[in-house]
Image: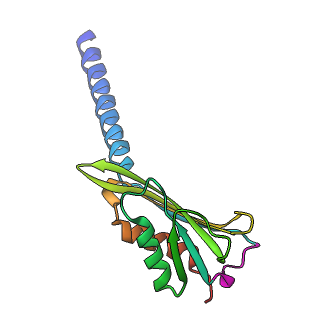
């Protein structure tokens, strides 16, 4: 009788151990496949009035993300300048933060772009793209994803 109980108890522990290993594997694998793209536009902002923008180059940018953003805005019909300081004589200043990660090769993990009112630096809109290693995009694709999400309802 004791032998049967020990065998049954061993099987139960074996199943629990297998279940825990499977659950941990699912959590680990899904953690590598995160993909988020969001945009928030202030309800009082009228982005259709924005025609000229200035992209403020991040001092930490070693990947020319400012160039990708300015090219993306130009292709959408905006007049764009780029520089290290914000400008008061444009319709909006564009600020960005790019975060890079390493997984066998370096890649952009996240990109946040904020469109700000030059008069008071108020954030009119912002967008964020986050792609982990398994869903990674090129920097150009991430810039396009963020700009598309921010500007999708704007009539030029």
Q: Is residue 59 left or right of residue 92?
A: left
Q: Residue at the spot x=45%, y=67% of the render? A: 66
Quarter placement of the N terminus? top left
Q: Nearer the viewer, residue 10 or 113?
A: 113
Residue 63 place in picture, x, y as percent: 36, 61
Q: Residue at the spot x=46%, y=85% of the render? A: 75
Q: Is residue 120 above or below residue 15?
A: below
Determine the residue located farthest toward the right in the rendered image.
44
Q: Is residue 11 left or right of residue 59?
A: left
Residue 17 place in picture, x, y as percent: 30, 29
Residue 38 place in picture, x, y as percent: 54, 64
Q: Is residue 54 above or below residue 19?
A: below
Q: Is residue 90 left or right of residue 111?
A: right
User: Magenta includes 75?
Assistant: no
Residue 107 place in picture, x, y as percent: 32, 56
Res 3 → quadrant: top left
Q: How many marks?
A: 0
Quarter placement of the C terminus? bottom right
Res 149 → quadrant: bottom right
Q: Residue at the spot x=64%, y=73% of the render? A: 92
Instruction: Report the magenta residues as a range.
Output: 44-50
Looking at the picture, the colour scheme in use is rainbow
Res 49 → quadrant: bottom right
Q: Residue at the spot x=49%, y=63% of the render? A: 57
Determine the residue located farthest toward the top in the rendered image.
2
User: Magenta includes 49?
Assistant: yes
Q: Nearer the viewer, residue 102 or 16?
A: 102
């Amino acid at each position: 009788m004791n032998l049967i109980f020990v065998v049954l108890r061993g099987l139960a522990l074996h199943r629990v151990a297998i279940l825990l290993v499977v659950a941990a594997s699912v959590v680990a694998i899904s953690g590598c496949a995160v993909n988020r793209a969001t945009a928030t536009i202030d309800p009082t902002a009228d982005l259709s009035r924005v025609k000229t923008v200035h992209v403020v180059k991040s001092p930490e940018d070693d990947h020319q993300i400012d160039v990708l953003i300015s090219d993306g805005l130009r292709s959408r019909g905006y007049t764009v300048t780029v520089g290290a300081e914000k400008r008061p004589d444009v319709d909006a200043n564009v600020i960005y933060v790019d975060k890079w990660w390493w997984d066998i090769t370096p890649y952009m993990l996240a990109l946040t772009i904020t469109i700000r009112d030059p008069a008071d630096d108020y954030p009119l809109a912002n967008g964020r793209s986050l792609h982990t290693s398994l869903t990674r995009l090129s920097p150009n694709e991430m810039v396009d994803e963020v700009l598309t999400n921010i500007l999708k309802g704007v009539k030029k």
